Amino acid sequence: MTDPELTGASAAARDRTLAGLAGAYRPRPVTPLMPWRFAHRLVKPYVITAPRRPWDDLMVVKVRDFSTRQLDFDESQGGLGLAVVVLHLGADSAYVVIQTWSQDFQSRLSLFRGQDLDTLRPAPSGVGPCVWEQEVLSHERSAYIANILTGNVNIEAWLDNVLDTRPTPPTDGFPSGV
């Protein structure tokens, strides 16, 4: 039995939109970086890149400096000193997602967007992470549970438990498919 609310012109328009999204989606490489170690804080940074959006060390330094203010605030609100920062160089803008683990199994999530890293501003209220950013956050939830919450707190294992979806170069010295 079909729900009448899910049929008709609005359903057809929705289905066309979903088909367009499905046809346009491509995985993006996720690059884990070396952890940022502060006096009272450990941060797992990542970079996600859309096609033809290179990143460099200067960008990472800018994001680290930018993130510090939010991480300080999160710490003042009950942060536990463990966080994840995602720099996402999207096709249209630069995004920074900061997730800080806090008390009572909670986390604080902050999103920023700008045309470039010098114009980052808080994302509008209600905006959440995109599908590529959620991939990292999902991995980090699992890593937090496995390495912190299972009763055997292992900070180094948590730091080492990263998501890396960069393409693997062929081992035979030839490009793929040759």
Image (cartoon, rainbow, N blue to C red):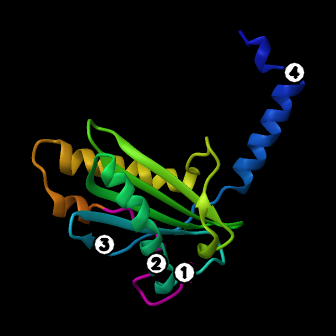
Magenta segment boundaries in residue numbering:
162-178
Looking at the rendered image, the quarter that the C terminus falls into is bottom right
What residue is at 54 percent from the left and 54 percent from the top?
111
- Which mark is on residue 8? 4
What residue is at 36 percent from the left and 52 percent from the top?
74
- Which mark is on residue 55? 1
- Which mark is on residue 28? none
Cα distance in 3D space between marks 1 and 3: 18 Å
Q: Of the two numbered discs 1 and 4 on the same chain, state the one appearing first in sequence.
A: 4
Mark 4 packing: few (<14 Cα in 10 Å), some, or many (20+)?
few
Q: Amino acid at mark 3?
A: Trp
Q: Main secondary structure of the magenta part?
A: loop
Cα distance in 3D space between marks 4 and 3: 52 Å
Residue 27 percent location from the top left of the image = 58, 60
Q: Amino acid at mark 1?
A: Trp
Cα distance in 3D space between marks 2 and 3: 11 Å
